[in-house]
């Protein structure tokens, strides 16, 4: 597993975790650190920088799974983030990852101790030989 964060302290907390490689990288102003990499799964939580969305999709191996969750418009009434630059527009994850097969999608309010507006997406990159099922109608 590879974990990435701009804060090197995040890596320090992972030093004793077997099987985890930490990369300290600034995904917003530095170079994309995964140009030649291919991952079986990518998990993104509470992070949005729109220019890297296509790079995240490109980092998925054939058959690779994407799990993405972050804040959506409307979250400003619950707290941070409030800045529209950090809030997904309606159905934005669906549009950003339109080349993947969507397994699940949610867009709405979550209750609990930290209520928020979120979007969640689970999607898979189909293998090149795989095709979407097609229903035929013979008349």
Image (tube, rainbow, N blue to C red):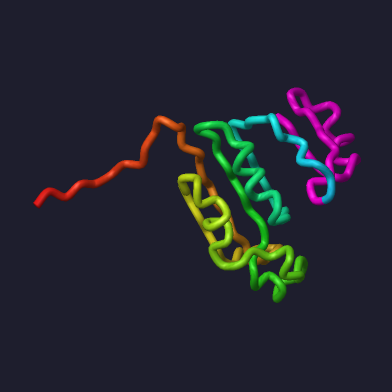
**Residue farthest toward the left in the current orientation of the protein:** 139
Q: Is residue 87 left or right of residue 11?
A: left
- The picture places residue 113, in percent across and down from the top left corner, at 70, 63
Q: Start and end of the magenta stretch? A: 1-28
Front residue (pair 54, 79): 54
| Quarter of the N terminus within the rendering | top right
Figure label count: 0
- The picture places residue 101, in percent across and down from the top left corner, at 46, 45
**Residue 40 in sight from this viewpoint:** yes
**Residue farthest toward the top in the current orientation of the protein:** 18
45 relative to 115, above or below: above
2 relative to 112, above or below: above
2 relative to 67, above or below: above
**Residue 111 in sight from this viewpoint:** no
- The picture places residue 34, in percent across and down from the top left corner, at 72, 35
Front residue (pair 109, 131): 131
| Residue 92 figure quarter | bottom right
Front residue (pair 55, 11): 55
Is residue 31 one of those drawn in magenta? no
- The picture places residue 129, in percent across and down from the top left corner, at 40, 30
What residue is rendered at 74% in x and 24% in y? Answer: 19
Is residue 23 one of those drawn in magenta? yes
What residue is rendered at 55% in x and 50% in y? Answer: 97
Q: Is residue 9 left or right of residue 120?
A: right
Q: Is residue 101 left or right of residue 73?
A: left
| Residue 111 figure quarter | bottom right
């Amino acid at each position: 597993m590879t974990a990435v964060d701009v804060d090197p302290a995040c890596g320090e907390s992972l030093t004793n975790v077997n099987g985890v490689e930490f990369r300290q990288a600034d995904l917003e102003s530095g170079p994309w650190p995964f140009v030649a990499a291919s991952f079986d799964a990518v998990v993104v939580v509470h992070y949005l920088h729109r220019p890297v969305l296509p790079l995240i999709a490109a980092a998925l191996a054939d058959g690779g799974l994407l799990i993405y969750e972050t804040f959506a418009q409307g979250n400003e009434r619950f707290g941070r983030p409030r800045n529209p630059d950090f809030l997904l527009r309606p159905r934005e994850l669906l549009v950003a990852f339109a080349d993947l097969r969507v397994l699940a999608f949610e867009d709405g309010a979550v209750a609990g101790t930290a209520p928020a507006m979120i979007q969640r997406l689970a999607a898979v990159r189909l293998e090149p030989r795989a095709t979407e099922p097609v229903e035929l109608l013979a008349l």
